Amino acid sequence: MKQENVLEIFKGTGALLEGHFILSSGLHSSVYLQCAIALQSPEVANQFGSAIAEKFREQGIETVASPAIGGLIIGYEVARNLGARFIWTEREQGQMTLRRGFTVRASERVLVVEDVITTGGSTRETIDALKSHGAEIVAAASIIDRSGGNADVGVPRLSLATLNVPAASPEDCDACARGEVAVKPGSRSTVSSKQ
Ligand SMILES: [Zn+2]
């Protein structure tokens, strides 16, 4: 699956919006991504899942692991396409951990999958949690990399599409300087502007 196809699907489903947005971090950006919107469609989730799985077919992946909540759907689809097991990590008192009775064996070959990598923080924390149980992290993958390829998670990493979309504080935002109003995606103003 080519990067253009991935972005076409994102734009077509409204999962990728272009404009002037306030991100949940408070920073402003010209691109807003909401993977959950694209992944509402099981068919789309399967397309992305099989495209990621294809790249790891020969790597003896036993288990796919994802950080909850963002990684759950895509991770599950990758696992299904690889015939692997699927587990997830989640935060317990701020610390990414394996819960719900999930375990990994020493040297178990694990692929970590996320929906979007921005800084790589959640993927790194998931890798650390699994390594602390002795797992071997083969690689990490995501549908979208919005770090422009810069996020370093300490293992080989791939994404179906790479974006370089800088976010800026309101004081440093070019669109704000031009007097354009920023919107929070999902808020009423975004919905009405699309109608
Ligand atoms: Zn702005």
Image (spheres, rainbow, N blue to C red):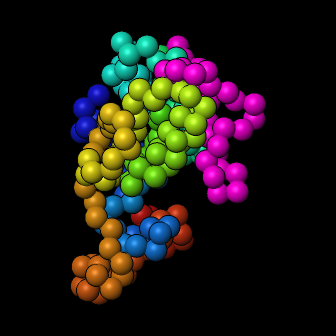
- Does the stretch in magenta take in 100? yes
Residue at figure coordinates x 28%, y 64% from the top left: 166
Within the image, what quadrant is residue 18 found in? bottom left
Q: Position of residue 191 (x, y in %)?
A: 49, 65
Residue at figure coordinates x 36%, y 36% from the top left: 155
Q: Where is residue 9 in the image (x, y as percent from the top left)?
A: 36, 40
Name the one closer to the observer, 93 or 33.
Answer: 93
Question: Is 63 positioned to the left or the right of 157 in the image?
Answer: right
Q: Position of residue 115 (x, y in %)?
A: 46, 42
Q: Where is residue 36 in the image (x, y as percent from the top left)?
A: 52, 46
Quadrant location of the N terminus in the rendered image: top left
Name the one closer to the observer, 165 or 130.
Answer: 130
- Does the stretch in magenta take in 4? no
Question: Is 194 positioned to the left or the right of 122 in the image?
Answer: left
Q: Is residue 155 visible?
A: yes
Question: Is 102 positioned to the left or the right of 23 in the image?
Answer: right
Quadrant location of the C terminus in the rendered image: bottom left
Q: In this view, does 165 lie above or below 97?
A: below
Within the image, what quadrant is residue 175 found in? bottom left
Name the one closer to the observer, 185 or 71.
Answer: 71
Magenta residues, start to end: 83-111
Q: Is residue 24 above or below residue 131?
A: below
Residue at figure coordinates x 40%, y 39% from the top left: 142
